[in-house]
């Protein structure tokens, strides 16, 4: 009887160990919609993040590689949102970078790609306490304003694509309103 209990206990322990050592995919719930009462467009990717976007925005395309959901408003301004875990980026696979340290590393990694393709980059605002950087990537007909932030091991990435309909300050203020 004692040997049966030991075998069962070993089987249970082996089962737990094998479950813990395998990489498990995280299920996500994605959704959101426009709320006319608050004049905001809600978007969420649970468990990674959520945002209330001022105004009415329609979903357009989704880029599965960058995990970016694109939106367009009635002024034809294009905006993108991406949420995900910090440890899914090639420069942080061990998950050691968090907070503002992650945000700085993300900026270097992301903007170097654009620079290597002949574009310029410029930091517009940094906030160590709130863990975000706003920067601009521009040149050769390309002009995008990006806010990247980290919270609880997750990254939020918001960007406004080329538009002359808003001033630089309006773009920065819009991005900051999303935090």
Image (cartoon, helix red, strand yellow):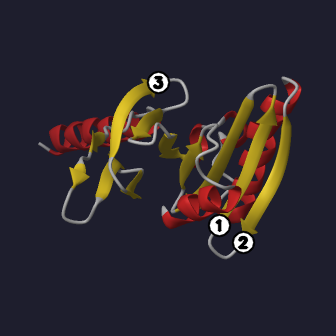
Label 2 close to label 1 by CB (< 8 Å): yes
Q: Which of marks 2 and 3 precedes in the sequence?
A: 3
Q: Is 70 above or below relative to 95? A: above
Q: What secondary structure is marked by label 1?
A: loop
User: Furthest-bottom residue in view?
Assistant: 129
Location of mark 2 (residue): 128
Residue 179 visible in image: no
> In screen coordinates, is 84 left or right of 12?
right
Between the C-alphas of marks 1 and 3, the distance is 25 Å
Q: Give the number of the disc on residue 64.
A: 3
Residue drawn at the location 25% of the way across and 44% of the way down? 9
Q: Badge 2, how many Cα within 10 Å: few under 14, some, many 20+?
A: few
Q: Which mark sits nearer the N-terminus, 1 or 3?
A: 3
Q: Residue at x 40, y 42 (%)?
A: 73
Q: Which residue is mark 1?
A: 131
Instruction: Tell me which residue sits at (30%, 53%) in the image.
Output: 42
Q: Is residue 30 visible?
A: yes
Percent position of residue 25, x then y: 39, 33
Q: Secondary structure at mark 2?
A: loop
* x and y percentages locating residue 27 in the rendered image: 31, 37
Q: In the rendered structure, are the residues bearing label 1 and label 3 in contact, judged by CB atoms less than 8 Å apart?
A: no
């Amino acid at each position: 009887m004692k040997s049966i209990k030991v075998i069962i206990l070993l089987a249970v322990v082996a089962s737990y160990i094998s479950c813990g050592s395998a990489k498990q995919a995280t299920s996500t719930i994605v959704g959101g919609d426009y709320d006319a009462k608050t004049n905001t467009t809600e978007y969420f990717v649970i468990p990674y993040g959520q945002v209330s976007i001022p105004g009415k925005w329609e979903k357009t395309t989704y880029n599965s590689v960058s995990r970016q959901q694109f939106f367009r408003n009635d002024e034809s301004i294009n905006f993108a949102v991406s949420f995900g875990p910090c440890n899914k980026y090639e420069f942080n696979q061990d998950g050691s970078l968090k907070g503002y340290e992650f945000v700085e590393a993300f900026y270097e990694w992301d903007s170097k790609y654009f620079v290597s393709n002949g574009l310029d980059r410029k930091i517009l605002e940094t906030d160590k306490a709130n863990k975000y950087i706003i920067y601009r990537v521009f040149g050769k007909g390309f002009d995008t304003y990006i806010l990247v932030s980290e919270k609880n091991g997750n990254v939020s990435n918001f960007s406004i694509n080329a538009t002359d309909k808003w001033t630089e300050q309006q773009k920065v203020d819009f991005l900051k309103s999303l935090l």
